[in-house]
Amino acid sequence: MNYDQILIRYGELSTKGHNRQFFIRHLKDNIKKALKPYKGIQVQALYDRMYVLLNGANGEQVIETLKSIFGIQSFSPAVRADKRLESIQQAGLELVKNSFREGKTFKVSARRGDKTFEYDSNDLNHLVGGYILKNIGGIRVDVKHPDIELLVDVRKNGVYLSTEVIKGAGGLPVGSSGKAMLMLSGGIDSPVAGYLAMKRGVKVEAVHFHSPPFTSPRAKQKALDLAEKISAYSGSIKVHIVPFTKIQETIHKGVPEGYSMTVQRRVMLEITDRLRKIHNGLAIVTGESLGQVASQTLDSMVAINDVTTTPVLRPLISMDKLEIIEMAQKIDTYEISSLPYEDCCTIFTPPAPKTRPKVELSRLYESRLDMETLIEEAVQHTETVFITPNQKKQEEDLSDLL
Ligand code: ATP
Ligand code: MG
């Protein structure tokens, strides 16, 4: 049966009290932005649900797009019937028939948004339910745990019916929790961290450090490709690319080997924090998880985090590598992350970085270098790229046409 609109349920938003309008506005804007490529679509927001009117757009593609929008608990493709009882009964029967198999149970859940309609929700449950019972042999009613729930929504301009409930991405609408800078490497972890931050409503701008010619253009492209993947969850993403070569060389020459990695991380965090200020972010997100490597011991975090009081969010902190990999596969970043291009953090890495660096020593070694000039220079020369989902694909399609 052809559906002509999609009903969207908010889920977690319903617990947000007076912030509700704020969340709904963010969600509506995000949905409109994501569905922009589909001509003619309209989005209507109500207090407890939203409707996407397809107006001829491809429903299956729209459904695929909706699946990656945070703040949606579930959604249902719906068909429209006119307001005569026979039409409602007929449309309901056809929908339930579509999903009915031997032994399945159902119930009707009607809602009368249009209070002038002659039947109330109870009447409708009985009138439509009775009609279905009469016309589908072997079907039974189960009001507590039905296999099929027929939703009947009476509105001013018609009656909307649906049975299928598709799980949404959950979480909160991106942007509703403010903005943060994501330190994005080419690794497995940081894209997953970005995804999880977005899921909690954080709008993310990525910061990537590269060190040409020690890191290749392909390593930079890898970070951009990862950014493109996670941009599917936010509609778009900015990536700030920081030239890091001079700083790395200076640290390599001037800092005792055991501390070069710690100092390097401190400077990366400092630069990210300055970019955060420039771009009005509230926090920094990293892909760190406790105990994986030398840079991720608690002592190390203390020594690195010493450069700022800005909240550093570490969504992966308690996750096992295998859990992170599983999530990377789910959001389709794993394959790109597994490509073997060098990261700026791996070049010049000493054979034995200190796993328990001291804050005082880290400060001392750093203070011996003329970092302020180099940091400002790196910030000045940072290049910003704006990325949207499927950008690459669109560019390829375009070059096919030329
Ligand atoms: P990832 O898989 O995200 O690279 P990792 O387990 O390899 O993480 P590290 O390489 O120690 O861990 O990096 C820890 C965190 O530091 C990363 O998750 C990321 O947030 C940040 N980071 C590392 N390298 C870069 C880089 N080149 N540009 C920006 N951020 C980086
Ligand atoms: Mg890494």
Image (spheres, helix red, strand yellow):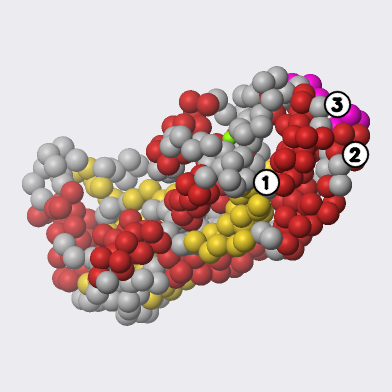
Q: Is residue 370 above or below residue 84?
A: above
**What separation in Å lies between label 2 and label 3 (alpha carbons)?**
16 Å
Report the magenta residues as a range.
355-362
Residue 156 in view of the camera: yes
Which disc number belongs to residue 358? 3
Q: State the quadrant of the C terminus.
A: bottom left
- Can you tell me whether the CB of the residue at mark 3 lies under 8 Å from the nearest atom of ligand 1? no
* Disc nearer the start of the sequence (2/3): 3
Which disc number belongs to residue 368? 2
- Residue depicted at 56% across the width and 42% down the height: 215
Asked whether 57 or 99 is in front, the reply is: 57
Check disc 3 and report its element: helix, strand or loop: loop
- Residue depicted at 16% across the width and 71% down the height: 86
Q: State the quadrant of the N terminus.
A: bottom left
Residue 111 image offset from top left, x and y in percent: 37, 64
Callout 2–callout 1 Cβ contact below 8 Å? no
Amino acid type indicated by mark 3: Lys
Residue 315 in view of the camera: no
The quadrant of the picture showing ligand 2 is top right
- Residue depicted at 61% across the width and 33% down the height: 346
* Disc nearer the start of the sequence (2/1): 1
Number of marks drawn: 3
Asked whether 20 or 332 is in front, the reply is: 332
